[in-house]
Image: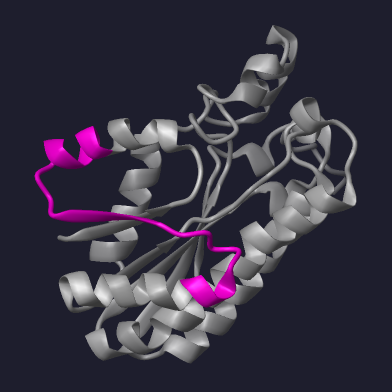
Amino acid sequence: MRVVLNYFDWEESLDELKKDLEIISTPYSIVKTNLLETDKIQDLIKTVINDFGRLDILINNIERGGWPVVHGPYTCDQWDLEMATTLRAKQWVFESSLPYLKASGDAIVINISSIAGIVGRSGPLSYIFNEGYSAANRGISLLTETWARRGAPEVRVNEIMLGIIESRHGENTRGWGLLTDAQKQDIINHILIGRTGTIDDVVKAAWFLINDAPFMSGSVIRLDGGYILGGEKVAPMPKGVL
């Protein structure tokens, strides 16, 4: 497998990323592109084709979310940035990639989204998800279904909807560190599995879709440890009156 990774900010993480790629000894290329500049996206995809000759797998993971606990009340600029990054950029990356994915003959797109699209700014996650990020993530599932129709039969399109994952809304993030111990525990108590997710959990789900799900397209895997179902108990069965 050969990998092309795009980045725009967080350059301080590049060295760690390169070390991880060198450990697994896979050929790779790292490209800096601002995906909010739609005209630059086509150049990015052409770089992939020029470097490696084909495109078989697209992990569509671009997002930006303002944490209420970090950013406080909304501004118009924050709303626009979240919509443009989380939703619009995904659309144009897919549009630019689709001809090459179809040419592969057996390609897959994995959209990465968040349970924010279901829960919004509510309950224990009120400090983590805001309305703009939540609305953008709800839109991703619609894109997943539309793209599955457009890509068929050569391209499968599926979605991994993440709950609270380490390095993404969970441990090792700035926002998580600002929560009180009680707020963190409220979140964990709402997760049926009783813990937040790990990067390995996400890798296994993506690997399954890539390698072991040839009959899945337009589907959503909700990888949240059961958060959506938490907070409610199943009452004992009553005796009834008959």
Relative height, residue 71 to residue 211 (above, below): above
Depth check, front residue: 78 or 142 = 78
Q: Is residue 110 magenta?
A: no
Q: In terms of depth relative to the viewer, which is nearer, 91 or 76?
A: 76
**Is residue 15 among what the camera can see?**
yes
Residue drawn at 50 percent across, 69 percent down: 219
Residue 160 x, y percent position in the rendering: 49, 56
**Which quadrant of the structure image shows residue 174?**
top right
Measured along the vertical axis of the image, is residue 75 above or below residue 41? above
In the image, what residue occupies the spot 19% across and 70% down?
Answer: 51
Give the magenta part as a residue range. Answer: 18-40
Q: Position of residue 198 (x, y in %)?
A: 42, 32
The percent position of residue 181, horizontal first and vertical second, equals: 68, 8
Residue 34 in the figure: left or right of residue 116: left
Spot occupied by residue 11 in the image (x, y as percentages of width and height): 43, 37
Compared to residue 95, the image places residue 158 above or below, namely above
Please indicate, yes or no, whether residue 214 appears anywhere in the rendered image: no
Instruction: Tell me: 148 left or right of 126.
Output: left
- Classify residue 106 as left or right of residue 128: left
- Confirm whether the magenta stretch covers residue 31: yes
Q: Residue furthest left?
A: 25
